[in-house]
Image: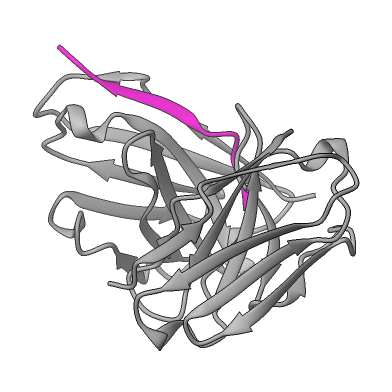
Amino acid sequence: EIVLTQSPGTLSLSPGERATLSCRASQSGSNTNLAWYQQKPGQAPRLLIYGASSRATGIPDRFSGSGSGTDFTLTISRLEPEDFAVYYCQQYGSAPLTFGGGTKVEIK
Amino acid sequence: QVQLQESGPGLVKPSETLSLTCTVSGYSISSGYYWGWIRQTPGKGLEWIGSINHGGTTFYNPSLNSRVTISVDTSKNQFSLKLNSVTAADTAVYYCARDVPSGNFDYWGQGTLVTVSS
């Protein structure tokens, strides 16, 4: 099973700042089969990025993903108030599908 | 607009079977894709349970494989989850979601909390 480790656990930033979130896989089976989700309290996760760098339908271009192999990054270029949430990565290159533990982006 | 809605008991006794159904609207399950179940707990985070396609082909997480059955009813545009021999560790919010062919989830239900307790 591929274990995904997300860092940092919490990111304290102000609106307008840039957020850089990391997701590291325990094995390289993920290739670019990695997705990012945003989750707000009481809501289901929302798909942001798939294929490591492709934005899902309706996702603003301030969200971007990069990486391959074992190291992946989600970047939010300028934080909007609605972007403060928890972010999860998920790999689907190797069964079973697995999720990272999440990074909380909070208002500083 | 694709929508998914979970339904089922919110309380299940230990050792019994957890049963949930996901009703899909805005898209016919028979048209394709896989359909999955994911659960979320404060301790273990998000955990993929398994997925099924319209033909009934299933993939399960090995950690739950022996206790899980996912089935599909295309006539009702629904798919279902059964998890047997539940314990308190199975207490979680259970989500159903559309599993795009490569394995990520683009549409999710709102989630339903299932508590295992006597």
The answer to whether B105 is drawn above or below residue A68 in the figure is: above
Residue, x 81% and y 56% (percent of image)? A18
Q: Is residue A47 left or right of residue B58?
A: right
Residue B46 highlighted magenta (yes or no): no
Q: Is residue B11 visible?
A: yes
Quarter of the image for the N terminus of chain A: give it: bottom left
Residue, x 80% and y 49% (percent of image)? B1
Q: Is residue B3 left or right of residue A62?
A: left
The x, y position of residue A48, in whole percent, is: 72, 59
Q: Is residue B101 visible?
A: no
Residue B115 highlighted magenta (yes or no): yes
The x, y position of residue A69, in whole percent, is: 50, 87
Q: Quadrant of residue A64?
A: bottom right
Q: Is residue A9 left or right of residue B42?
A: right
Magenta: main secondary structure equals strand
Q: The magenta stretch spans which residues?
A: B105-118
A100 or A107, which is in the foreground? A107
The x, y position of residue A6, in whole percent, is: 49, 59
